[in-house]
Amino acid sequence: MSTPADTMKSGPRGRSRGTRTVIAVLYAVAVPVVLIVAWLIWAGVSPQIFFPSPIAIAEAFVNTWLGPSLTNDVIPSLARLGVAIVLAITIGIAAGTVIGLTPWLRELLEPVLEFFRAIPPPVLIPVFTLLMGITTSMKLAVIVAGAFWPVLLNTIDGVRSTDSVMTETAQSFRLTRAERLRYLVLPSAAPRIMTGVRQTLSIALIMMVISEMFNTSSGLGYRIVYFQRNYLIAEMWSGIVLLGLVGVFLAAVFTFVERRVLRWYHGIKETERA
Amino acid sequence: MSTPVSTPVTTARRRRAARKAILGLLGVLGFLATWQLIPMMGIIDERFLPSATTTLARLGELVLDLEFWRNVRRTLTYWALGLAIAVVLATALGTIVGLVPFLRRATHTSVEFLRPIPSVALIPLVILIFGIRTPAALVIIVYASFWQLFIQVLYGVGDVDAVARDTAKSFRLPRSHRLRYLILPTALPYFMTGVRLAAAVALILAVTAEMTIGVPGLGNVINLARNAGDSPTLYAVVVVTGLLGLVINLVFRAVERRVLGWHQSVRGEVAL
Amino acid sequence: MPDTLLEVHQLKKVYETASGPVEAIGDISFDMRQGELVCIVGPSGCGKTTLLKCIAGLLKPTAGTIRLADRPVTGPPESMALVFQEYGRSLYPWLTVRGNVELPLRHQKMDAAQRSRLVDDALEAVGLEHAGRSYPWQLSGGMQQRVAIARAVAYHPEVLIMDEPFAAVDAQTRADLEDLVRALHIERGMSILFVTHDIDESVYLGERVIVLSTSPTWVQDDIAIDLAPERDQITTRALPRFTELRTHVYEQIQRAKRGEAVRPQA
């Protein structure tokens, strides 16, 4: 969200580059630092049961997640999440491209897809436990089944709205089918697809956590509920922090990939603004 | 045929709409038939996947049951309350933060860190604090839907066209007029998108909260049906949640289209 | 080698629109020889773009035939390149300038070095040898249209078709681009079919100007432009002969607009 306007504003004040970097860093860390310090002081002045001090949480974090739990809970959970995300995105783009490029198929499936998209993904968890039992493949399948809808529907929309002049250009230069897909259809749908991917990531994370909260004996979601039921407050908080970090990590990876894939798109946006 | 000019328009459009409706109906029928055949042919046991007719019959029974409607109302109450709180908070905070460059810069990292936290991670915490009661569910719903709208409002008020802004300045429009005639119309499409996304997310989290926290509502019915091995009810309620989601999506999309009628860049299928 | 490159014979196009059939093109016939630069002018809305799309194989004519190098046109022909008016939508924003020029060559049987040579040569021909790594949207409108022209040049078509290519650029850029088209024609011997609504442009560029009537369109006049092949924005446009030709085309179009012209019986 750093807009070019921000940098332009600080430019003409005539500050040196170094000073500007320092100011930027201050802006970035000031609020989080103030919040954490306030929490520290508050926890010191009047200890709260449900809000342990950040130090206690940090200790619990190291003790809980960097021990055997790392291999028992954290890594399996994150591995499932990663595989499920890759599957969801791949299936979504592949199916979305086929459906988006085939008008009759699109019209045939549209109402059904609209309905499935509207089902709140977490209700799929009891359904899938019923169908598949509590297995790793079920945990994987339920994340994919809940999370691939945004990519699918955005790909359908993106693929069908390819610009008419661009399509005619491809026709007149007799590009092959594969070339049209690679150089025209998919790139022009990419902004929509990335919008879908962003939603898919957050749903996948939610699904991973909830699917582990019940009827299981390992995984991140299970651990956090376990800590809560046993009043291990600092440990529970450390679990929330860990999930938060996973979310932030996914968002960071997404932003990095999106900047690269849609460099042209953001470039156009900036040119239009100027 | 008294109006020869407009008749072909309507027939052509009607034909396309009819084709779409028929294909869509075929799709739904095909889906129902598949659903019916899979358990009938024994591909999946009827205990795990009750057939379409069994499920719909159960749905028919539920519709006559007052308790079912109470549960629908509970879920929708969580949804509406959570969404309303999120909309008020996100609009107010989003506008203030978006319009004040200092706040915008100062909160940037905090927002980028808080937003991706999955709200379901907070479920254990809210159970501890509030117990198995309404506020616990509301916190989860509000947290998730707040960010959807907050980000949109933030973008929206920041997206004012440079030329339009300079125009307003050169005519020395007072602050209130700039807000009313420049910022509000610019931010409106973003706001509508944000509300639509927030409404969808709020329903997901309402059902999730009922399932995971255990507050009463459709999500809780799903849990109970699952534990009792009552798969027809389980599937019937899943269908109901889907229909609720569908209605919410359609309503909010229709509202968005109405409000933004002047704004939509609707490009129809190219008629060569 | 047959002298006739492009042959349009009794072309007719009727659109089935939502408000009933609309006859866009009534009956168009003309020939174009190898190495010619032919301009097509007509009043606005006379179906110029429809005609081009038919010739380019993007639209199916209702009746009549189009032959390019003695082969009937049924789909987009191999040996034809198009330059669209909407350069912004015809160039792919996710590809660099080089990528755009190279794209139509990708499926042709040639090695990378040869392809690279063709791209370099085409970029040089339009004066963009330094801009290969830029993206189209980083360039001005005139430069973007140069990229589209380079893409067509690199394709080595037998005929280059340009659909009001300079309608959306400013006057000075337009003059430069006109000279570029002349240069491509003279130096590389390219056959060019150039559609425009600008009378001056058609006379300045063309060796022949075909005047179209209003819709339903037919060929109202076919004028040979007997100006010297070496043309110059200042001196050529100042020639008395230029003014005469320009006036002639102008009158024809005015007649077409008033509907005075009589449709020739085929």
Image (cartoon, rainbow, N blue to C red):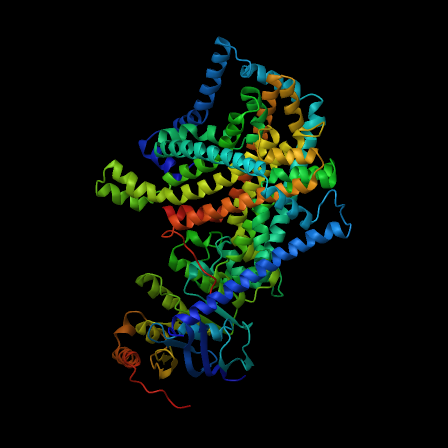
Residue B203 screen position, x and y as percent: 53, 38
Q: Nearer the viewer, residue B15 or C33?
A: B15
Q: Name the residue at 62% across, 61% down.
A: C111
Residue C249, can we see it?
yes
Compare residues A272 and B173 and report the one nearer the observer. B173
Residue lying at the far bottom in this picture: please name it: C265
Say whether residue A119 is visible: no
Question: As drawn, is B178 to the left or to the right of B1?
Answer: left
Q: Quadrant of the N terminus of chain C?
A: bottom right
Q: Residue at x 42, y 24 (%)?
A: A26
Taking C127 as reference, is B128 above or below it? above
Q: Quadrant of residue C140?
A: bottom left
The percent coordinates of residue C249 (x first, y second) are 30, 79
Q: Is residue C113 left or right of residue C143?
A: right
Of all residues shown, which one is farthest toward the left?
A: B171
Q: Nearer the viewer, residue B143 or B81?
A: B81
* Number of numbered markers: 0
Quadrant of residue A52 within the rendered picture: top right
Residue at the far top in the pictured view: A45
Residue extending farthest right:
B42
The picture places residue B23, in percent across and down from the top left corner, at 58, 61
* Quadrant containing the C terminus of chain C in the rendered view: bottom left
Residue B253 lies, with reference to residue C187, above or below; the image says above
Q: Residue C66, percent across and down?
A: 50, 80
**Would residue A68 appear left or right of C31 to someone viewing this image?**
right
C208 and B272: which one is in front?
A: B272
